[in-house]
Image (tube, rainbow, N blue to C red):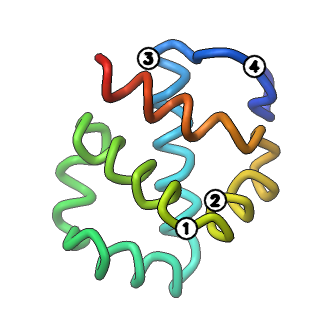
Amino acid sequence: MGAGMKHKGMPDAEVSAALALRALEWLLRDDGRRERFMAMTGCGPEDLRAAAEAPWLLVAVLDYLLGDESLLLAFCADCDIAPDMPRLAHLRLTRS
């Protein structure tokens, strides 16, 4: 898959984890998004550093995005990702 994730169908676990990490990076790049994410999830900077690739954090990132449609659509537009990919990645990661 290239820079954009336009793939249709269920992504594999590796692609799903990469999408969740990309979403985390996107959230953390903006002060407002970062502060809101940390407030809503209870994750502090130390938690994020310690668990950057932990399955629970990857699922939490996707849960957070899926809970706010405007944020989800902004992420997908900014990162050239099909809007259904975060939901499919979430399904994959919760099944693993």
Q: Pointer 2: residues within 10 angstroms few (<14), some, or many (20+)?
A: many
In this view, the residue in front, 12 or 22, is: 12
Seen in the picture, residue 85 relative to 59 is either above or below; the reply is: above
Q: Which residue is mark 1?
A: 68
Query: In 3D space, how far apart are the residues under numbered discs 1 and 4 (Cα atoms)?
Result: 22 Å
Q: Secondary structure at mark 4?
A: loop
- Which residue in the protein does label 3 denote? 13
**Is tag 3's residue or tag 1's residue first in the polypeptide sequence?**
3
| Separation (CA) of disc 4 from disc 2 | 17 Å
Mark with earlier residue (1, 4):
4
Q: Secondary structure at mark 2?
A: helix
Q: How many marks?
A: 4
Disc 2 residue type?
Leu
Residue 4: x %, y % from top left: 80, 34
Question: Could you tell me the amino acid type at mark 4?
Answer: Lys
Q: Quadrant of the N terminus?
A: top right
The residue drawn where x is 22% and y is 68% is 43
Residue type at mark 1 is Asp
Tag 1 near tag 4, CB within 8 Å = no
Vertical placement of residue 41 versus 72, above or below: below
Q: Are marks 4 and 3 in contact (CB under 8 Å)?
A: no
Above or below for 54 versus 48: above
Which residue in the protein does label 4 denote?
A: 8
Indicate which disc, 4 or 2, sits on the residue closer to the N terminus: 4
Q: Earlier in the sequence, mark 3 or mark 2?
A: 3
In the visual, does 44 lie left or right of 22?
left
Q: Which mark is residue 72?
A: 2
Q: CA distance from mark 3 to mark 1?
A: 23 Å
